[in-house]
Amino acid sequence: MKIIIKDNYNQMCEEASKVMKEVILKEDVILGLATGSTPIGLYKLLVEDHKTNKTSYKKIQTVNLDEYVGIPQNHEQSYFTFMHEQLFNHVDIDPKNINLPRGDVKDLNKECQRYNELLAKKIADIQLLGIGGNGHIGFNEPGTAFDSVTYITDLQEKTIQDNSRFFDKIEDVPTKAITMGIANIMAAKKILLLASGVNKAEAIKELVLGDININCPATVLRNHPDVVIIVDKDAASLL
């Protein structure tokens, strides 16, 4: 596990873009992608790099971590919409190479099976992660088994509260999601985790210094052979 501490969010994103571009420049690779506010700065830098340096995504494939259950794919807060607004619409990626789980289908169990089968064939060369204030990765909340694969999860109250800033009112926040399981995440060849802000400090402390246990799902990353953690000083303030 490699830990890099930068002074601020912008420097964290710049460092993360270097790690991501090392993989992207190999061209024929699979990127595991994440949503939320943390990677927005990184995606902005990748878009700028594409426009300035003509870095191509034509041969890139992507797999996303998760999606809300109960809102349509084209909803303004869906992760499908987020990924297109933040990255896909601004680079030359082939739409058929974009893969996300769907939370708006009738048979969610069948969708979990479909996505697991897809992930078995498309192993991410690098999996981008954020971390929840309670230590969740993807939507794998505390208590999730380390051998879990794609499933429907109930979001914990802290996660719902954290996500409510993206919705008009908390009642609008989905309470369920479809997410890669921890075993799916750990199958990636390389993992890049980003964290910014004092609200992530306790989770980062537990990830780096705590015991490996299901009460902080991110601690499982210490069992992975190639993990890079990039944080700003605020997120690293308890280390």
Image (cartoon, rainbow, N blue to C red):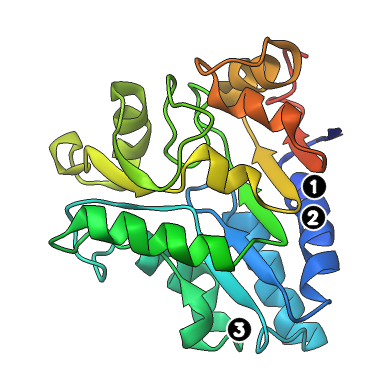
Residue 77 visible, this orientation? no
Residue 192 visible, this orientation? yes
Judge from the rendering whether residue 122 lies leftward or rightward of residue 102; answer left or right: right
Q: How far across and down, in percent of the image, does residue 55 sit?
A: 77, 84
Q: Sort mark 1 into few (<14), some (14-19) or many (20+) by Cα contacts within 10 Å.
A: some
Query: Are the residues flagged by discs 3 and 2 in contact, CB closer than 8 Å?
Result: no
Which of the two marks, 1 or 3, is nearer to us in this view? 3
Q: Which mark is residue 14?
A: 2
Q: Which of marks 3 and 2 is nearer the N terminus?
A: 2
Quadrant for residue 193, please give it: top right
Q: Earlier in the sequence, mark 1 or mark 3?
A: 1
Q: Residue 102 carries which label?
A: none
Spatial CA distance of label 1 from label 2 is: 5 Å
Q: Which mark is residue 11?
A: 1
Query: Are the residues flagged by discs 1 and 2 in contact, CB closer than 8 Å?
Result: yes
Query: In the picture, which quadrant includes the C terminus?
Result: top right
Judge from the rendering whether residue 108 lies leftward or rightward of residue 119; answer left or right: left
Tally the marks.
3
User: What residue appears at the point 64 percent right and 43 percent down from the top-left corner?
Assistant: 186
Q: What residue type is labelled 2?
A: Glu
User: What residue appears at the point 42 percent right and 65 percent down from the top-left corner?
Assistant: 100
User: What residue appears at the point 59 percent right and 52 percent down from the top-left corner?
Assistant: 39
Q: For mark 3, what is the residue? A: 91
User: What residue appears at the point 58 percent right and 46 percent down from the top-left corner?
Assistant: 185
Quadrant for residue 82, please give it: bottom left
